[in-house]
Amino acid sequence: MNDRPMSRNMTRRQFLARSGALGAVGISLPALLAACGGSDSAGGAASTTVSFDNWPLYIDPTEDSALGTVDRFAEATGITMNYTEGYNDNNEYFAKIQPLLGNGKTIEADIIAPTFWMAGRLISLGWAEKLPLADIPNMANITDGFVNPPWDPTGEYSMPWQAGMAGIAYNIDVTGRELNSVEELFNPEFKGKIGMLTEMRDTIGLIAMGLGIDPSTIASFDDAAPAFEKLAKAKADGQIRQFTGNDYTDDLVSGNFAACIGWSGDVLQLGKDSPNIRFVIPEEGGTRWADVMMLPKGVKNSANAAKWMNFCFDPVQAALITQYVQYLSPVKGVREELAKINPELADNQLLFPDDATSARLRAFATLTEDVEAKFDEEFSAITGA
Amino acid sequence: MGESANPKNVIELDHISKTYGDFVAVHDANFSIATGEFFAMLGPSGCGKTTTLKMIAGFEQPTSGRVMLDGVDVSSVPPYKRNVNTVFQQYALFPHMTVFDNVAFGPRSKKIDEKKIRTSVMEMLEIVRLSDFAARKPTQLSGGQQQRVALARALVNYPSALLLDEPLAALDLKLREAMQIELKRIQREVGISFIFVTHDQGEALTMSDRIAVMSQGHVEQIGTPEEIYRTPSSLFVAGFIGSANLLPGTVESRDGDYLVVRLRVGAIVRASATGTAFSVGDKVSVMLRPERIKPAATVEVQGRGIEGLLTDLVFQGATARLIVRLDDGTEMTCLADSSATMPQIALGRRIAITWDSDCGFVLNGWPDKAGANTTDIDHIESTL
Amino acid sequence: MTTAVTASRRISTNADRVGLGAMLVAAVCLIALGARWVSGPAASVLLLVLALVLIGVLVLALRGGPEARRLLAPYGLLKPGMLWLALFFLAPVWSLLRISLSTKPSRFSVDYNFTWAFENYSNAFKDFGTQFQHAFVYAAIATVLTVLIGYPLAYVIAFRGGRYKNILLGMVVIPFFTSYLIRTIAWSTILADRGFVVRTFDAVGLVQVLEWLHIMDNGKLLNTPAAVIGGLTYNFLPFMLLPIYVSLEKIDTNLVDAAGDLYSSAARAFRKVVLPLSVPGVFAGTLLTFIPAAGDFVNAQFLGNPNTTMIGNSIQDQFLKQNNYPVASAMSAVLMFSIASLVLIYTKIFGTEDLA
Ligand SMILES: Nc1ncnc2c1ncn2[C@@H]1O[C@H](COP(=O)(O)OP(=O)(O)O)[C@@H](O)[C@H]1O
Ligand SMILES: [Mg+2]
């Protein structure tokens, strides 16, 4: 359950919590449609199509007279994009593509949007195709933190799509005070009113930071063992109310959760209607993540995909996407462009964290296959699933 | 009818009525049933027989009037505290219990000692000749056997009276006849009053000591089968019991016990009458049972016969059935000794029909339509 | 040609045995194909065998005369059922059992090696004992609750419903036309900490009582075992109510009158007549409720907490998240067989075939 889709208004987000829930039980309609739906990418050099399977509500759509990015791309290049929202959960998506890619077959989508650690897994499994970097001059606009990232050390396989932070989200009506420490999640005062994410790297990562362990340097299970122990104990004590996906926002707003681990973009949107919902990167630090664009092995429309990536890394285009999805943009110059169209957003700390905040953020280390297996197994033993 | 508190009466219905909303299902029923009597309630479907029975059993409360059981007013006593038992229309045997458990149900409700129950149940199964079937389930029995289980289940409680609601209706003809005899035998053996509901007049006539004929919620007549057959109190009873030729006419004069009636067809006949007093000029019908009419070539004695066209002649073995159309269109049925038919009596001829003057019976009023004579051949055969 | 005819004549006297044999061969072929025992050229060979067997039976039926046709007809009629069973039940179960005893060469491999890996089963028991326990205990309690709620409801509708019967039944059933998931999620809103129910309980001072009864916990109604059991009870109520209603509806009201006529009070008439006659409905209802409830994961996911997860959640997690098909299959197999044996024992004890 790693949906992190964004939108400006509550109704969309609520819709999303529902679809997240549907996805959680394996009935993701978009995923099914994406899996079944044929595309007319007939291959060949002269192809004028490309397909992108992304997370729900993760791009600006064409609304009223304003064209969305997909249509602006078509206008600029003449390439028709078949844009689908088949992503709901990294592991589920993996389970879906595994039988194809694992057997040397190709999948429908030309561009997929795994989260960084899943990108690392796909790269190491050899299920990703190299990007035609020469055709993506806007590569130069990738922000420094995402150049040759740990999950793609040579930078040949992936381009970041959007990034975000995980920290502590809380409902001040319930807590009665501001929170500023990971330790608050374990405060008996909030027993049974704490939410954690089913996203292992955010939950374990944040707890690790609370314990002074840098998640970006974790290499073995032993490194993270104290975080697992702390989580296991909290669960056994009844401290944790639920492990949730994106739907934590419902529990937070309704007051079922006093506090939980949350994602910056969600709180940015929630704050508009519910000023009692707060988000903080705790003093111990927070985690950082990114969803990336990459090409599955055997991709058919690689050249058109490169044109798309290049288009999205134009700061003018990227600013329009950011304005809609409200996550951290990996594109240089977006803040300046955004200032022209939406100065208020351009000054938002949750969209453009200052250097001091950024310095406190860590991305979870890339785990080797065996270590990752151990982490997943231990984590699922705690979440009780 | 309604005798007052007679110790020999098991059941007394004291002017009971039952209405459902505006609809009167039973109107002012007022009669008694004596100990050991086989009493039939006869009437067409929907005339209120079941409703009356249910009021006796206690499943329905009378809207007005009282139900007396063994001389005690039980009008507000629930069924399970009334000492009468019912044999239901579809038997209502408990499908999940064996024959034995079905029969033992009543005694067990009364918390009688299980040992005593065993002997009395087996005794009763003996009486209904089902001793070998005690361990079977009802579904493993034939219709007649189920019927007898239902009887045993009720009788084992030795109720003051047994209520039977069309108990034989579901059986085929052969079995029905056998069960009629069987029921009579059992009734004699146990000596309990049977109140027997039926819409089959043949059944009522052959089995009962007394019959109450009902129509549209009213009790039309109560009497022995013979009384009801010979001297019905109304056109309805005459038509419902057996078959009857009804000749419309008007009272001409009185002649001792007889009335002289001018028939609509013109003839003047003599016929007996009881009960109701008639005066000259009254519209009446003369009832003639088909088996009492004789065909003849010509009318020999005035006042004893009429003429008509022979329209149908059916040879039936011992008897022959003749249909004669009178001049006013009335059709008469005549059941004659087949050896008595003669060559002059042939289809399409005018013939005479004659009868003894005490065979005609005067009833008040005219039938609804000319020739509304009922003919039930089966019944005539069985009652001859 | 003539020899073939005489041969088929000779065989036709044993046509029923030939028919049975052909059906069995066909079934094995179908299972083998459905479960992917064989692939590639071997599969084509098997298909050919299947076709030959079926054509052979057809030829036999046509050539063997009316007698042979009469004997073969039942097998012909069995065919759709057998096909269905083989393709949609036996083959998947076979696959499941096979995978449950397999190991994967590496975590993300798409291949399984059949290695009699019984450790999958011991792992399933070792790691998920609590979840199995939750599944069976919660499902059992929910089943009992559905009987306690469903029976009186069905009784009132069947015997006191009068002409409102269908409307009342509709009122019971119509909420279940909405999605299972939506209904369950709706409950999480209803039972929320600051929701209507908890606030009402709080106002009337019921919270202490419910906490003492372990129905509420630390001021919470949602995300407790009680909420999970309540959700199961709610969601499976129609599966209990409808069979009970049908069995009550079938009871001839004259039987109740007859019991009254035979000196039974209303209570005894119910105990001795109505209750025993409705047992088949209760029996069917318990099976229809318990079996899916034991495998349910939706209620525990939305109404439970991390300490109330049921085996369905674990199986889903192992299949979809952990990619651990062998252990997930082993868990499914254990769940399937434990439910099957529970049902068998239950049927042996309470089975009511002569009442059906
Ligand atoms: N519970 C009831 N409500 C309304 N009408 C009824 C009820 N029971 C019987 N009736 C009506 O009363 C009349 C007499 O019914 P019943 O006693 O059953 O007749 P039957 O002589 O055929 O046994 C029928 O017209 C029937 O429709
Ligand atoms: Mg009746």
Image (spheres, helix red, strand yellow):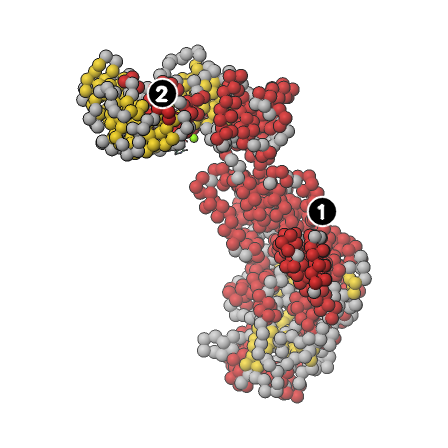
Q: Is residue B27 above or below residue C204?
A: above
Please give the chain letter of the residue carrying mark 1. Answer: C
Q: Is residue C148 above or below residue C118?
A: above
Q: Residue furthest front?
A: B343
Confirm or reject: label 2 Cβ below 8 Å from ligand 1. no
Q: Residue at x 59, y 80 (%)?
A: A41
Identify residue type, mark 1.
Ser
Q: Quadrant of residue A348?
A: bottom right
Q: Percent position (x, y) of residue C254?
A: 50, 32
Q: Is residue B286 left or right of residue B77?
A: left
Q: Quadrant of ligand 2?
A: top left
Question: Which corner quadrant holds the N terminus of chain C?
Answer: bottom right
Please give the chain letter of the residue carrying mark 2. Answer: B
Number of marks: 2
Q: Quadrant of residue C7?
A: bottom right
Q: Residue at x 60, y 62 (%)?
A: A27
What residue would you read off at disc 1? C341
Instruction: Determine the CA span between mark 1 and mark 2.
Output: 70 Å
Identify residue type, mark 2.
Ile
Q: Is residue C328 above or below residue A324?
A: above
Q: Is residue A78 above or below residue A206?
A: below
Q: Percent position (x, y) of residue C125?
A: 76, 53
Q: Residue furthest top?
A: B7
Is A203 or A342 nearer to us in this picture? Answer: A203
What residue would you read off at disc 2? B228
Image marks 1 and 2: residues in contact by CB distance under 8 Å: no
User: Can residue C324 be seen?
Assistant: no
Helix, strand or loop at label 1? It is: helix
Determine which of the numbered discs, if any, sits on residue B284 in the image: none
Q: Quadrant of residue B207?
A: top left
User: Can residue A251 be seen?
Assistant: yes
